[in-house]
Amino acid sequence: MEQGTIKITIDDKEIWAKDGQSVVEAARENHIFIPTLCDYKSLKPAGTCRLCTVKIGGRFVSACTTTVSNGMKVENESSEIKDIRKSLIEMLFVEGNHMCPSCEKSGNCDLQALAYRYQMTAPRFPFSFTNRRLDASLPHLILEHNRCIQCLRCVRGVRAKDGRDLFGFVDRGAKIHITVDKTVEEAFSEKTAAAAMAICPVGALIQKGGAYQTPIGDRKYDLHPIGSEIESNIEQSGGSHDTKS
Amino acid sequence: MTPNPEKKKLVVATTSLAGCFGCHMSFLDIDERILQLITHVEFNRSPIDDIKHINKPCDVGFVEGGCCNTENVHTLREFRKNCKILVSLGQCAITGGLPAMRNGIPMSDLFSEVYQNTNNPTLGNHLIPNDEEIPIILDRVYPCHEIVKVDAFLPGCPPNADLIWEALVRIIEGKSLDDLTYQYFKYD
């Protein structure tokens, strides 16, 4: 691996980062896990979920949208940061209706995996018990609005062939929800459904006809916590996202 | 965990509120370890021994299910009053679970759907039950910790038998229920 030229400190560990890298990327390359939900592979960071909150220079910032600079000191694993992250996870859980026992994504869900890692039992906030719609009108894709965390991963990452947006947001505030542009042909394809399910960190986008195929025990996060593949530098084995692709 | 004949046995009570008894089935899935367990604890009110009401102070109470009616609330308060440690067992006790899927739907819609807009022959008169013998249904299903103080939570639907066993061993040994084993700590 090519070594970077910028020296930063995460907790007590000095690491080398490359110019222009985000704190999350630099940490990942050095086997330090900073939890993320809205951050996804090559997509431009959106900073919507705040799970990657770290403390730099006494201020809380999102590590996915913060670029490394020489001598930067990052607080990542302090009890204060851990509690902030846990409270963010809890807020996401109470804000929607996340019924893990009946969810197709259970075991492969990033939100659930983070809740396991931070040992969430009962959220400190009251459940909202909202009554959101479930849209199963498309031939291959279910939009389960009760589980959406508004991370924008589908909006940013799944596009039509000509580059047009397929997913988008409608309404504002508490009423905000994702929608699919049904004037675009690709909205009806099986390929889009598989891509959408794979990019969704929770169970809000579900491909029809293929749920519960991975047995309990073989799913992505059944045996090892999320982030352990980064910390151990071993490629993650076992279950995959529940898609047909 | 070795038996100590000098030590007083812990008193354990369990109950199921708005649950399906799946958590109790999982409790029984500790299998032959239950023989080891009864050298350390005695059961008070529980569907396992069919004692109907708590009749002495208990050390630990396990509650399965959330509260969907007044009788659930009454039982939960009885547990809180008589148990030193109260444990929410399973997703329904912790989140309301499957019964809580009715939360967010107006009660009038629920009643008319179940009792009035039905062709069920056993509900021929289409009356909404209203008898003082029947516990009153609550406006929504409440997780247990929204009604009383709950000391510990064992998630799962049902909680893994090994998680229940781990928790029992820790309680008997006087240890904290934080940082339970990852492989057993699941919500499904």
Image (cartoon, grey):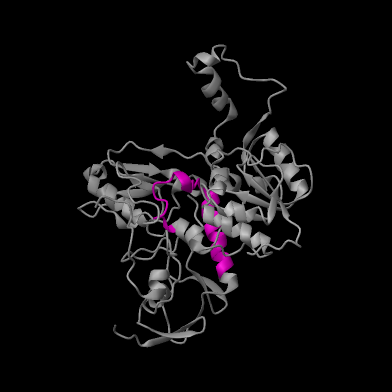
Q: Pick out the residue farthest to the front.
A: B5
In the image: residue A229, left or right of residue B23: left
Q: Pick out the residue farthest to the left.
A: A162
Q: Looking at the image, which is closer to me, B4 or A55?
A: B4
Q: Quadrant of the N terminus of chain B?
A: bottom right
- The tally of labels here is 0
Q: Position of residue B173 (x, y in %)?
A: 67, 64
Q: Quadrant of residue A78?
A: bottom right
Q: Is residue A176 visible?
A: no
Q: Is residue B24 above or below residue B175?
A: above
Magenta-drawn segment: A82-110
At x 74%, y 42%, the residue is B77
Q: Pick out the residue farthest to the right.
A: B56
Q: Looking at the image, which is closer to me, B85 or B94?
A: B85
In the image: residue B153, left or right of residue B160: right
Q: Is residue A188 visible?
A: yes
Q: Position of residue B107 (x, y in %)?
A: 59, 29
Name the magenta segment's main secondary structure. helix
Q: Position of residue A198 (x, y in %)?
A: 32, 54
At x 72%, y 22%, the residue is B132
Is B164 colored magenta in this rendering?
no
Q: Is residue B96 above or below residue B125?
A: below
Q: Looking at the image, which is closer to me, A78 or A186?
A: A78
Q: Position of residue A117 (x, y in %)?
A: 50, 64
